Image (cartoon, rainbow, N blue to C red):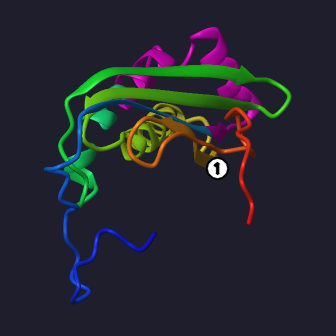
Amino acid sequence: MGLTHFDENGKAVMVDVTEKKDTVREAVAEGRIFVNKEVFRAIKDGTAAKGDVLGVAATAGIMGTKRTSELIPMCHILPITNCRVNFEMEPKDCAVHCTCTVKVTGKTGVEMEALTGVSVALLTIYDMCKAMDKTMEIGEICLVKKTGGKSGDVYNETRGGQRKELDIL
């Protein structure tokens, strides 16, 4: 499959999805922010000076998914039907793991929305905790899985996605 965001002259264009059928589509993305012990404790105990870090970050992640088309030039505006942002505290790595799941019934997928949701949620954690640690690291952001649509289901085998039997030529 070639690059779909370019016309025959190499000019960037939005993909025309007019003729595509509406289908239920879902995408899951994940990422982590690595913090120092003081920040980890403050987030876990709910004692950060700026308040409920994970509650605010979850709200920010949801807002990010809804504004993806304003940030990524060739993304379509999508009527998102569901979005969940979840966090898991990882004491061994002094990290917060974020997962964003986005659903839509539409003509195009929500991978970019899920990736944006994770990114905005993790950036919000950084913003709320930067007074305690300016060396936090955000990383490991990736698509875990996507379902629905013409290209079918895709699972990132190196992450939390389920294994899919692959036909290798």
Specify whether residue 103 is in view: yes
Specify whether residue 49 is in view: no
Residue occupied by mark 1: 135
Q: Which amino acid does label 1 sit on?
A: Thr
- For this orientation, the residue located farthest to the bottom is 9
Q: Is 64 a magenta residue?
A: no
In the foreground, 117 or 144: 144
Residue under the image location 59 percent in, 35 percent down: 132
**Residue 110 shown left or right of residue 11 in the figure:** right
Compared to residue 143, the image places residue 45 above or below, namely: above
Residue under the image location 77 percent in, 32 percent down: 94
In the foreground, 114 or 108: 108
**Residue 15 shown left or right of residue 39 in the figure:** left
In the foreground, 120 or 4: 4
For label 1, the SS is loop
Residue under the image location 46 percent in, 31 percent down: 128
The picture places residue 22, in percent across and down from the top left corner, at: 24, 34
The picture places residue 40, in percent across and down from the top left corner, at: 69, 25
In the foreground, 35 or 28: 28
Residue under the image location 38 percent in, 41 percent down: 149
Quadrant of the rendering where the C terminus is positioned: bottom right
Q: How many marks are shown on the rendered structure?
A: 1
The picture places residue 119, in percent across and down from the top left corner, at: 46, 43
What segment is highlighted magenta in the picture?
A: 32-61
